[in-house]
Image: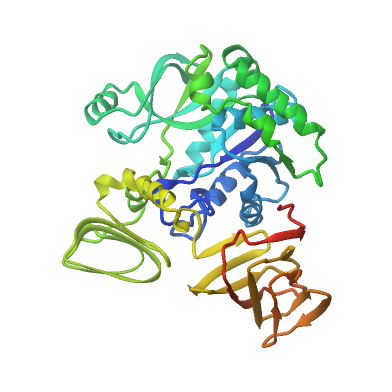
């Protein structure tokens, strides 16, 4: 007999602060491109599509990442017959609220017996075939009413992961005796030597109805507030069937707690499938560096690098050549607007840099020089006192909002393609090598009517050039 309907649920949140300066709040870890040019999120979608018997993949993410997520899904080669659904958070509340709301959706759409496969958007899995086999084993246990997690067979004593202690056998898996926090080095070595401990992957498989029943029993406040939030979501008008907006007020009342603390550590119905699947959560630059083959001196490069009298050093640079001379045991990560140099043993402390940048009000904690928007991208080429120069790319058929700026004027020069422009009371078509000037206080809009990407240069002038100097009147993407 066929098994239960399987719906992958991808949790795509968190800023990935330990992977700064590539991962930032405006372009977080799931959207990071690996050496093969694919993002972690795209790899997760591909993995999910191969297992989605429902034909649907649910993504729980911040509403600001909806369009970037959609762009990644559109690249999915296995997307034929597979549709995307998004549950959009106004802010993060940890994994228990996210999974609970996904469970309400799955139960309503497919029935309480439907099986959820909960995946993180930012993991790498090298052995996809072994992973698929593990999922089938987990789904069989979930059919029996168990909440199933995936315990990674440890490759060594790792202090950066939590662990699962395995208990008695149940079907093709093991009962979970307990979850333990990240250990020190000695404890981790003892765990691995015992053969009874596994890395906690943060991936799960369970029936939607069973998950909700267990939450009601063990985390009633999470269940109750999440149910109230879901009911309010259903009452809200939706422009389409693709996305659910979570109301901020109701979501703020759901306790912000992980699914581990809320449920997995409390329930007696937890099982684990041991999984040797080449798994990594890519939690630091040290982990990223291990994905690259070393040279004879232990040096690794993602991009162009020259190593002279240097050993055990990792360089990541996609935009320019980096030369390392007379160095040892370093991580060097170069981006157009920020450079990280760190010792591998301190890779976990990179998040402290992000904290300092936030304290100082520096935009580098949040934005890259190139920033994604629903309509395309902009890149800051140069800025100084009273001016800023941007390169703007607009997707075919896309448009910026109808807007005005109070403190700056803008001069637009079309480099490639053509633009339909609203400039005050005028509407005009601007061709390649033509321009238009928009005074401060003028309503304006930019649209790409063509089939090719529109490229233009924007020169801003004024007393204040912050991105928050914007008043929107109309926006097809629902931004305020």
Vertical placement of 424 versus 144: above or below? below
Residue lying at the far bottom in this picture: please name it.
Answer: 433
From the viewer's side, name the closer residue of 339 and 43: 339
Q: Is residue 144 visible?
A: no
Vertical placement of 15 versus 311: above or below? above
Q: Position of residue 382 (x, y in %)?
A: 49, 75
Say which residue appears at 59% left-offset and 23% top-offset.
Answer: 140
Q: Quadrant of residue 126?
A: top left
Say which residue appears at 71% left-offset and 52% top-offset.
Answer: 480
Horizontally, residue 251 falls left or right of residue 320, namely right
Horizontally, residue 343 falls left or right of residue 477, namely left
Q: Quadrant of residue 414?
A: bottom right
Which quadrant of the figure contains the N terminus?
Answer: top right
Q: Position of residue 51 (x, y in %)?
A: 61, 39
From the viewer's side, name the closer residue of 442 and 198: 442
Vertical placement of 365 versus 133: above or below? below
Q: Position of residue 97 (x, y in %)?
A: 60, 29
Q: Is residue 67 visible?
A: yes
Colouring scheme, one of rainbow, by chain, secondary structure, one colour: rainbow
From the viewer's side, name the closer residue of 41 and 150: 41
From the viewer's side, name the closer residue of 129 and 324: 324
Say which residue appears at 63% left-offset and 15% top-offset.
Answer: 216
């Amino acid at each position: 007999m066929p098994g239960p309907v399987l719906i992958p649920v991808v949790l795509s949140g968190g800023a990935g602060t330990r992977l700064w300066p590539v991962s930032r709040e405006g372009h977080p870890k799931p959207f990071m491109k690996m050496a093969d040019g694919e993002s972690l999120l795209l790899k997760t979608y591909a993995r999910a599509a191969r297992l989605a018997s429902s034909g649907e993949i649910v993504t729980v993410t911040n509403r600001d990442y909806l369009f970037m997520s959609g762009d990644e899904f559109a690249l999915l080669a296995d997307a034929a017959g597979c549709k995307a659904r998004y549950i959009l958070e106004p802010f993060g509340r940890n994994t228990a609220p996210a999974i609970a709301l996904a469970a309400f959706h799955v139960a309503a759409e497919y029935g309480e017996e439907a099986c959820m496969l909960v995946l993180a958007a930012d993991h790498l899995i090298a052995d996809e075939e072994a992973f698929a086999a593990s999922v089938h084993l987990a789904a069989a246990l979930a059919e029996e009413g168990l909440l199933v997690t995936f315990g990674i067979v440890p490759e060594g004593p790792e202090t950066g992961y939590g662990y699962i202690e395995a208990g008695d056998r149940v079907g093709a898996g093991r009962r979970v005796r307990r979850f333990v926090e990240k250990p020190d080095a000695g404890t981790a070595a003892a765990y691995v030597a015992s053969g009874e401990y596994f890395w906690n992957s943060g991936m799960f498989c369970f029936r939607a109805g069973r998950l909700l029943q267990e939450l009601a029993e063990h985390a009633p406040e999470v269940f109750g507030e999440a149910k109230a939030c879901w009911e309010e979501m259903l009452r809200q008008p939706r422009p389409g069937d693709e996305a659910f907006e979570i109301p901020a007020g109701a979501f703020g009342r759901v306790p912000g707690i992980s699914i581990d603390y809320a449920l997995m550590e409390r329930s007696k119905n937890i099982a684990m499938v041991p999984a040797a699947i080449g798994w990594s959560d890519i939690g630091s630059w040290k982990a990223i560096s291990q994905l690259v083959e070393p040279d004879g001196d232990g040096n690794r490069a993602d991009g162009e690098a020259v190593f002279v009298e240097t050993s055990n050093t990792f360089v990541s640079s996609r935009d320019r050549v980096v030369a390392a001379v007379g160095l040892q045991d370093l991580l060097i990560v170069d981006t157009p607007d920020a450079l990280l140099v760190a010792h591998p043993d301190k890779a976990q402390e990179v998040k402290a840099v992000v904290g300092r940048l936030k304290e100082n009000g520096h935009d580098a904690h949040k934005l890259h020089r190139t920033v994604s928007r629903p309509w395309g991208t902009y890149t800051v080429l140069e800025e100084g006192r009273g001016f800023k120069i941007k390169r703007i790319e607009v997707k075919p058929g896309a448009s910026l909002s109808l807007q005005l700026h109070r403190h700056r004027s803008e001069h637009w020069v079309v480099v490639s393609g053509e633009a339909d422009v609203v400039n005050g009371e005028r509407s005009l078509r601007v061709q390649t090598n033509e321009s238009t000037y928009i005074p401060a206080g003028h309503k304006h809009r930019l649209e790409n009517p063509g089939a090719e990407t529109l490229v233009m240069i924007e020169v801003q002038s004024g007393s204040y050039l912050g991105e928050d100097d914007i008043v929107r009147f109309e926006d097809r993407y629902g931004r305020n």
